[in-house]
Image (cartoon, rainbow, N blue to C red):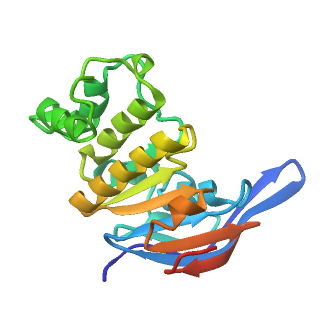
Amino acid sequence: MTKILNVHNLKKVYTSGSKKLTVLDNISFSIEAGSSFAIVGPSGSGKTTLLGLCAGLDQIDEGTITLCGEDLNGLNEDQRALLRNEKVGFIFQDFQLLPTLTALENVSVPLELQGVKNASKDAKELLDKVGLGSRYDHYPSQLSGGEQQRVALARAFSTKPEILFADEPTGNLDEETGKKVIKLLFDLNKEMGTTLVIVTHDLDLARLNQHVLRLKGGKIVINETTAIS
């Protein structure tokens, strides 16, 4: 199958004064298009840093990352932003909805930026799919955490991304609400054929994916296609 993400000998070092902290060291893996992939590990293991690098949100210190056929090392900031806008979706732990926009407007904006003519119609269809057909005109402050994350799901899938990065998507939700959101995430992912990359500390969520990469201290300790314990 086609590899949508290739990471080779990746290293990331942060400098604070005279001290250097290696956050990621010699990270190599690949992800097949259309698959689901979990990155797990304790706090401070480097998993969120890894996600940011793979998505082109941060600069690589050493190594290479190829995302959707593009070598991120060879792209400037504007080119990386264009790649993200055209082919990448995001879901964050804290939802990151625009507070001054309604649910419908939050989902419509990415479509409008891509020049979609029926942005509002498409956005309504997605909100219907995530069970928010009665919440079009509600602002984020008028929605529960679970509802806000469902709006974020609809927004993330609105542009039909080739790959979607989800950073602790249930981190701010209670267990029951989190399970509902995850079911919607996997259902939409399957329907649209998107590649799904989930960063999580939740091993139960990780086991729902086809592949699991586990980090500890910035290094890979597990890289397998079977469930982990």
> Which of these two is toward me, 206 or 9?
206
Residue beneath the point at 23% across and 58% down: 192
Residue 56 rendering spot, x and y as whole percentages: 48, 56
Where is 151 relative to 171, above or below? Answer: above
> Which of these two is toward me, 219 or 81?
219
Total labels: the figure holds 0
> Which of these two is toward me, 146 or 48?
146
Residue 161 rendering spot, x and y as whole percentages: 29, 54
Give the farthest residue toward the front: 176
> Which of these two is toward me, 161 or 74?
161
Where is 149 relative to 203, above or below? Answer: above
Name the side, left or right, on which 12 lies relative to 92: right
Name the side, left or right, on which 21 lies relative to 218: right
Residue 14 rendering spot, x and y as whole percentages: 75, 55
Image quadrant of residue 147? top left
Residue beneath the point at 47% across and 35% down: 95
Can the viewer see residue 13? yes
